[in-house]
Image (cartoon, grey):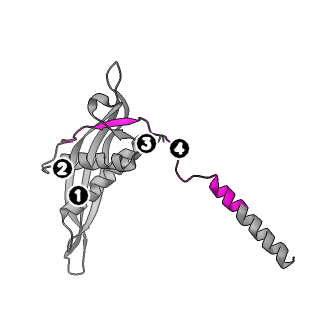
Amino acid sequence: MSRTTALCSCVAATGLMALGCALYSFTGGRTALVNNVHVSVFENETPEFGIEEALTKGIIEGFLDDNQIRVVEPTAAEAILSGRVVQYERRAYTFDETDRVTEYIVEIWVTANLAKQGSGGPESIWSIERQRGFGIYNADNEDEQAGQQRAIDKIGEDLLNRTIKSW
């Protein structure tokens, strides 16, 4: 094969690959179960003060950042997301050679329900009995709030995914 033929073949293959990529999208089609949602303040069944407000705020921020489903007031909502914080735990996670704690883990468990508003009353779209979120933080240069926020972010991501994915 001549050098010119090889060059033409390479250019043609590159062009076909570029055309194929132009027709493909890495973002999926809209699969959300609802168009808008109201996130009620989660109830707190734990002794951890303020966790319900931090969790609710984190979930709302996750929906807002994702921007696929609008967060609205309850009277304008197609569905209501509600839930309860049922367990909160912080414990040592890793140790160094002298048995000093180097990392802690914060675990938060919630129940959650997404209910569509209907003329006959709310109708559950999905419900979770025990969803776990966790966050690990460094004992030397972070505090419990860092682990708590990571756990909240994980729960928010899981609840969002359950709402926007049809699987």
Report if the CB atoms under discs 1 and 2 are less than 8 Å apart: yes
On the image, numbered disc 1 is attached to which residue? 148
Measured in 3D between alpha carbons, the distance from the residue under mark 3 to the one under mark 4, in whole angstroms, is: 10 Å
On whether residue 17 falls in the magenta region, the answer is: yes
Q: Amino acid at mark 1?
A: Gln
Front in this rendered view, residue 144 or 79: 79
Q: Amino acid at mark 2?
A: Ile
Q: Position of residue 32 (x, y in %)?
A: 45, 39
Instruction: Determine which of the numbered discs, if any, sits on residue 51 in the image.
Output: 2
14 left or right of 161 in image: right
Give whichever of discs 3 and 1 has the lower sequence position.
1
**Mark 4 neighbour class, 10 Å CA radius: few under 14, some 14 to 19, many 20 or more:** few
Q: Amino acid at mark 3?
A: Ile
Range of residues picked out in magenta: 16-43
Q: Position of residue 164 (x, y in %)?
A: 43, 42
| Helix, strand or loop under label 3 | helix
Name the mark nearer the viewer: 3 or 1. 3
Report if the CB atoms under discs 3 and 4 are less than 8 Å apart: no
Q: Residue at x 24, y 37 (%)?
A: 40
**Mark 3 neighbour class, 10 Å CA radius: few under 14, some 14 to 19, many 20 or more:** some
Q: Is residue 11 above or below residue 34?
A: below
On the image, numbered disc 3 is attached to which residue? 164
Give whichever of discs 2 and 4 has the lower sequence position.
4
On the image, numbered disc 4 is attached to which residue? 29
Give whichever of discs 1 and 4 has the lower sequence position.
4
The quadrant of the image that shows the N terminus is: bottom right
Name the mark nearer the viewer: 1 or 4. 4
Q: Position of residue 113 (x, y in %)?
A: 32, 36
Give whichever of discs 2 and 3 has the lower sequence position.
2
